Image (cartoon, rainbow, N blue to C red):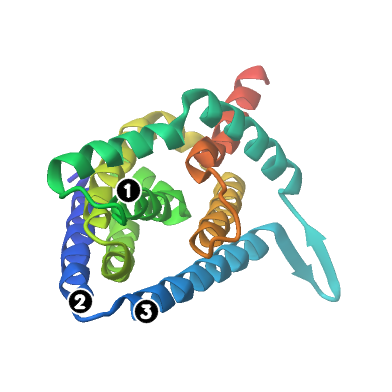
Amino acid sequence: MVGLGTIVNVAAIIAGGGAGLVLKRFFPRRIRETLMQGIGLAVVIIGISGALSNSFTVIGSNVSAEHILIMIISLALGGLIGESAKIESRLDDFAKICENKFTKPSENSTFSKGLVTAALVFCVGSMSIIGAFEDGVGRNSDILFAKSVLDGITAMIFASTMGFGVIFSAIIVGLYQGLITLMSVFAAPYLSDVVVAQMSLIGSVLIMAIGFNLLHISKIKVGNLLPSVFVPVLYYVIKSVAL
């Protein structure tokens, strides 16, 4: 069944987020803050390890860098597209609409932060993109099933620290992966191992940026950089047509 992987993924996020809300009641504020710092560090390490594994190759005693140029071009072009489309601002607006409808007014509400942060973490990884493609071309949903387990656990941890908004990130994930699944029929021929590695590299860089934001080291507009992940596919589509 096409789209089954995304349906299971969305359900896992909702279930994990619900479990996290239950756990949140047992954690005082100081523990939640420490947990958030730990999560931020973990996200940074995950991003760094993914970026290194997809950009450097060790052959004997030599280390060669790969995909660095396409990464720079993708981040620049993707950032231009994202800023023009105001993706981050639109995500925040969506979060605020949901917050106003489903939560009580609170000066210290973390609803928007939880929704946007969780949605970006669940969307920028290579498993989300490649899994949705695999699901769309009718191969299998195994990647998204595995991602569902990881996202369910992550949603539980996020919800225990950032609250109710994490559950609503499932809406963004469903729309995002569903769109990729629909597009997969046309993009699948261009999804070579090289393209996958380039997309994974850029996704890892964005995950690292999310970690920096969680640690309050910076305020990077990761949402506006999200189109960067798809620039390698666009590049190879244009290249194939031109040739």
For the point 63% across and 30% down, the residue is 77
Disc 2 from disc 3: Cα separation: 14 Å
For the point 37% across and 48% down, the residue is 116
Mark 1: which amino acid?
Ser
Mark 2 or mark 1, earlier in chain: 2
Label 1 residue SS: helix
Disc 1 from disc 3: Cα separation: 20 Å
92 horizontally vs 238: left or right: left
Residue 232 position, x and y percent, is 60, 37
Kindly report which numbered mark, 2 or 3, lies closer to the viewer in this rendering. 3
Is the residue 6 above or below the residue 223 in the image? below
Kindly identify which residue carries mark 2.
23
Kindly identify which residue carries mark 1.
112
Kindly identify which residue carries mark 3.
30
Mark 2: which amino acid?
Leu
Mark 2 or mark 3, earlier in chain: 2
Graded by Cα atoms within 10 Å as few (under 14), some (14 to 19) or many (20 or more), the crowding at tag 2 reads some
